[in-house]
Image (cartoon, rainbow, N blue to C red):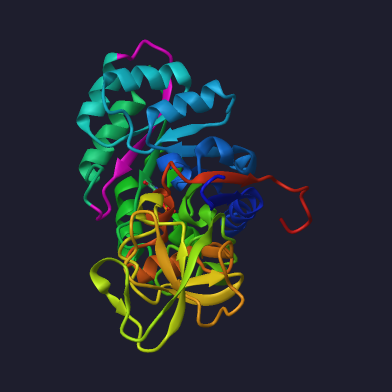
Amino acid sequence: MARPLEATIVLDAVRHNLAVARACASAAKTWAVVKANGYGHGLERLLPALAAADGLALIEFDKACALREGGWRKPILMLEGAFDAADTALARAFGLDLVVHTDEQLGWLAAGATAAPVRVVVKFNSGLSRLGFDASGLRRAHAQLSGLPGVAAVGLMTHFANADIAHGADDAIERFQAASAGLAGERTLANSATVLSVPAAHGDWIRAGIMLYGATPFSDRPAAALGLRATMRLHARLIAVRTLQAGDSVGYGSTFTARQPMRIGVVACGYADGYPRHAPTGTPVTVDGVPTTTVGRVAMDMLMVDLERCPGAGVGSRVELWGDAVPIDVVARSAETIGYELMCALAARVAVRVEALSALRSGD
Ligand SMILES: *Cc1c(COP(=O)(O)O)cnc(C)c1O
């Protein structure tokens, strides 16, 4: 028998969340951000649910080329641009749009100027200070790129440092607007947090990532309150049940000790599956639909749960680690991380089932 642990990718939920993003910014086009293998969901699996996106945005050139070979015809934006001259040539050959954030990338584009034209998006540093030009660099790069015969169109972008905080993007938006004033080209500024909360940042193209995957970009607003649905469920089963006596400890390091006799269950899921090792005793789960919590330290292949509230539970009982009843964001917060990290960390050894798209209902 297969190990009783399975992730489910819910394509209806992805399609719904994309519709939420598009409704938030109905005047803009939508880049569906699918880097990191579609935030751990499996990029190829997601494509049927992303048909309404105007383009896909990612980092990885091998994945982008595979998308083209698989028949994706709409735009593809490489969010970090080319990593070398060969990538620039790949972009021309495969029709990939390139972010340009360094003079080196500019140089590779200038060198191949007679080849097939490529569309580019020049990036402004509005305060994140990882990638992008300052204001004068932006204008210089825009002018240079606009003059290259090998460049078909020049867009403008920035990426926010504090989009998840109320008014956290205000300064950055102003800086971007000042730096790009008068320059021709489509604008893209908004990640999920600003798609959801800052219409002034919507521009010509939004870049929706985490919201497509049903997790919140905010620390204080749950995904359900934003109208988002869980797209990844992680379910396992109990492989053992035992009764601890008062004073018995469970798990490595004996971090949890029973105060009175109690039943616990052993779940077929551990940190080698992507469940966070730092989730402490008390992290929410459900067992046969009943809310309860983990006890003791998460191990490589197992974790333990309190069955005191689940008298009917036994070997084979179904455990939701995250999904509809246990939001991934709640587990993430308990482990002092974010939903992004948990979904990206789903391990390759976990079996994945895809819940196919249903026929569209009105409202989807
Ligand atoms: C990942 C990424 C996004 C998407 O951000 P979310 O917070 O997941 O919506 C947008 N823009 C850039 C440049 C990115 O790298």
> Does residue 341 appear anywhere in the picture?
yes
Question: As rendered, which of 279 and 63 lies closer to the eye?
Answer: 279
The stretch drawn in magenta includes residue 116 = yes
Q: In the figure, 74 relative to 225: above or below?
A: above
Counting every numbered tag in the picture gives: 0
Instruction: Name the residue rendered at 33%, 32% in the picture.
Output: 81
Question: As rendered, which of 341 and 363 lies closer to the eye?
Answer: 341
- Magenta-drawn segment: 112-128
Q: In the figure, 167 relative to 189: above or below?
A: below
Residue 80 image position (x, y, % from top left):
32, 37
> Does residue 204 appear anywhere in the picture?
no
Residue 336 image position (x, y, % from top left):
31, 68
| Side of 59 relative to 139 (left or right) | right
Instruction: Name the residue rendered at 49%, 61% in the picture.
Output: 215
The stretch drawn in magenta includes residue 142 = no
Q: In the figure, 337 relative to 358: above or below?
A: below
**Image quadrant where one finds the N terminus:** top right
**Image quadrant where one finds the C terminus:** bottom right
Instruction: Name the residue rendered at 54%, 82% in the picture.
Output: 309
Residue 99 image position (x, y, % from top left):
35, 35
Q: Farthest top residue?
A: 114
